[in-house]
């Protein structure tokens, strides 16, 4: 059965009421709360992440600065050694011990290998090879005019080397490799037979050949890294050429064994909340790590290395997430090296930031769970209250038996529609309808049959009128229909249509008992008299209804007098 439409009420913003269904409002409020709580939590996560990144960079910076400081001390000493030896070449000391170096050299220079150690308690021995071996290399040369001063200066340098080797700093190894076929080393040669092999090893190192004039025109410090399969032999070296009066005497070298750098990194790691440190050269070759070489070398795959190298070309310090690891890096001030700090997810969770993150996540989950539970409860309550309100409102507006407007709501709608028609100057018609012999149906078949008749008639009335028309039950078996915009002739056609449909339908009131009813209808129109007052129009239609009844029932009357048939 079609339900009558509710005429628009003259209340402000009523057209917005359909959007403000209580359930929708509850949903919207909880969504806003959920979004706000999520945004606030996410903001805290971002702040926490920023603090974590800052802490990682700060820890890395501390280690990098400590390593840089110790390397800088070695570089400063290297330059000090060069300045000292240049001063010795310019004005050699006249001590008897230093003067005897020349005589000792003259006696041993033809030997395949030799050493001069005049006062090993104060200075370091000089190791050398024969004239024949020197002549085999194009980079070597024994200039007899300069050789005496260089040897005495080397003895003075040996004294400085001895002092340097006893310094309680990062272990460093200092060398002076002369083009005249001898060298000094803070690491003593245990067997004289090893002098030649050590000399050739130093001769083939890049820090010697790389200090030629065409290779190092600025004559400044140059860095080299040597990475072998044996970690104990891996070194980072700084070399500087020794020049005096436009003559290249040799090379001073300060090497930093990676086996000594690793304990420094491990010590710094133990003072912090975990994290692996890795040291790379400028070609991104792994030099040393706080973990074992096997674990460290497998730390990054090719894709990770490509990402890190791309980031390193853009900045000297930064961080990058690689899966479950956070990698922060900082380029060292010396030798183009890069120090990495790798912090795993497990280490992050076990740290302060991890515990705070877990607590924050649990609080968000707990709050979200409580919010969802509250949303379910409140939404159900609001939905039930809204449904109850709608039910009570429907009961207040409609007749529960016929599902048409009841008398009070129908009269309210009639007043609104009649005023609207009056303001617009449009036709407005009223049909008054009464079921014929309804009391007899109740008396003969009972009130249940009467209710079926009323419901059946209401259904036919509702399905016979337009969407904008309004029908209501105004009495026991009396109905009234409002037809805004319809003239008297059009209203008569509607009334006749209703009458014929009701007359043609049979009603099943019992299993084998059917009943056919008829109705009488009266029609009035506001344009007949120009009076739009609904009560007046209804009284006219009601009087015409009784004319129809008096004239034999089952007919439509639209005039005040019906001629006798």
Image (spheres, rainbow, N blue to C red):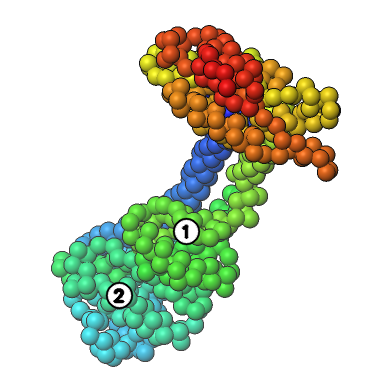
Residue 433, can we see it? no
Residue underneath mark 2: 208
Where residue 183 appears, as percent x and y from the top left, is: 35, 75
Instruction: Give the number of the disc on residue 340.
Output: 1
Q: Is residue 81 above or below residue 32?
A: below
* Residue at x 39% of width, y 56% of height: 331
Q: Nearer the viewer, residue 170 or 89?
A: 170
Q: Nearer the viewer, residue 458 or 5?
A: 458
* Residue at x 70% of width, y 32% of height: 517
Q: Nearer the viewer, residue 84 or 201?
A: 201
Where residue 50 appears, as percent x and y from the top left, is: 49, 42
- Left or right: 26, with 533 as reference point: right
Location of the C terminus (image quadrant): top right
Q: Is residue 243 above or below residue 360?
A: below
Q: Secondary structure at mark 2?
A: helix
In front: label 2 or label 1: 1
**Which one is earlier in the sequence, the residue at label 2 or at label 1?**
2
Quarter of the view holding residue 513? top right
Residue 34, can we see it? yes
Q: Nearer the viewer, residue 295 or 253?
A: 295
Location of the N terminus (image quadrant): top right
- Mark 2 and mark 1: Cα distance apart in space: 30 Å
């Amino acid at each position: 059965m079609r339900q009558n439409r509710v005429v628009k009420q003259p209340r402000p913003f009523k057209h917005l009421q359909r959007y403000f269904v209580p359930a929708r409002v509850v949903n919207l409020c909880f969504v806003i709360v959920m979004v706000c709580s999520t945004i606030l939590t996410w903001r805290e996560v971002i702040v926490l992440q920023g603090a974590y990144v800052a802490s990682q960079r700060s820890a890395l910076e501390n280690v990098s600065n400590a390593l840089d400081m110790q390397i800088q001390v070695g570089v400063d000493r290297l330059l000090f050694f060069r300045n000292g030896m240049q001063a010795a070449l310019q004005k050699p000391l006249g001590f008897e011990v230093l003067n005897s170096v020349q005589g000792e050299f003259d006696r041993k220079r033809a030997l395949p290998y030799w050493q001069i150690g005049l006062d090993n308690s104060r200075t370091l021995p000089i190791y050398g090879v024969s004239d024949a071996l020197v002549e085999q290399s194009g980079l070597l040369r024994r200039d007899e005019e300069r050789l005496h001063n260089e040897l005495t200066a080397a003895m003075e340098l040996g004294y400085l080397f001895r002092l340097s080797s006893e310094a309680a700093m990062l272990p460093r190894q200092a060398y002076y490799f002369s083009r005249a076929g001898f060298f000094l080393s803070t690491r003593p040669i245990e067997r004289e037979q090893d002098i030649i092999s050590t000399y050739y090893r130093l001769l083939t190192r890049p820090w010697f050949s790389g200090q030629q004039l065409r290779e190092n025109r600025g004559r400044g410090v140059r860095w080299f890294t040597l990475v072998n399969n044996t970690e104990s032999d891996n070194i980072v070296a700084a070399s500087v050429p020794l020049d005096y009066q436009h003559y290249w005497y040799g090379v001073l070298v300060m090497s930093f064994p990676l086996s000594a750098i690793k304990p420094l990194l491990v010590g710094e790691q133990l003072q912090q909340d975990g994290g692996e440190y890795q040291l790379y050269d400028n070609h991104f070759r792994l030099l040393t790590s706080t973990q074992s070489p096997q674990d460290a070398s497998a730390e990054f795959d090719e894709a990770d290395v490509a990402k890190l190298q791309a980031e390193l070309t853009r900045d000297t310090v930064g961080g990058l997430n690689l899966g479950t690891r956070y990698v922060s890096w900082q380029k060292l001030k010396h030798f183009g090296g890069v120090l990495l700090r790798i912090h795993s997810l497990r280490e992050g969770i076990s740290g302060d930031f991890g515990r705070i993150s877990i607590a924050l996540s649990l609080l968000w989950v707990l709050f979200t769970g409580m919010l969802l539970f509250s949303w379910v409860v409140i939404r159900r309550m609001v939905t039930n209250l809204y449904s109850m309100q709608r039910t009570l409102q429907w009961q207040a507006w409609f007749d529960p038996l016929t599902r048409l407007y009841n008398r009070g709501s129908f009269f309210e709608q009639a007043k609104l529609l009649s005023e609207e028609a009056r303001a617009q100057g449009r036709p407005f018609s009223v049909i008054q309808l009464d079921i014929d012999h309804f009391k007899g149906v109740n008396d003969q078949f009972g009130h249940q049959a009467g209710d079926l008749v009323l419901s059946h008639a209401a259904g036919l009335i509702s399905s016979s009128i337009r969407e904008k028309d309004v029908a209501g039950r105004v009495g026991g078996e009396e109905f009234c229909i409002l037809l805004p915009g319809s003239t008297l002739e059009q209203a008569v056609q509607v009334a006749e249509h209703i009458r014929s449909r009701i007359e043609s339908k049979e009603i099943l009131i019992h299993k084998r008992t059917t009943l056919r009813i008829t109705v009488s209808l009266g029609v009035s129109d506001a344009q007949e008299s120009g009076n739009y007052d609904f009560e007046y129009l209804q009284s006219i239609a009601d009087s015409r209804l009784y004319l129809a009844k008096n004239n034999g029932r089952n007919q439509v009357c639209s005039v005040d007098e019906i001629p006798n048939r």
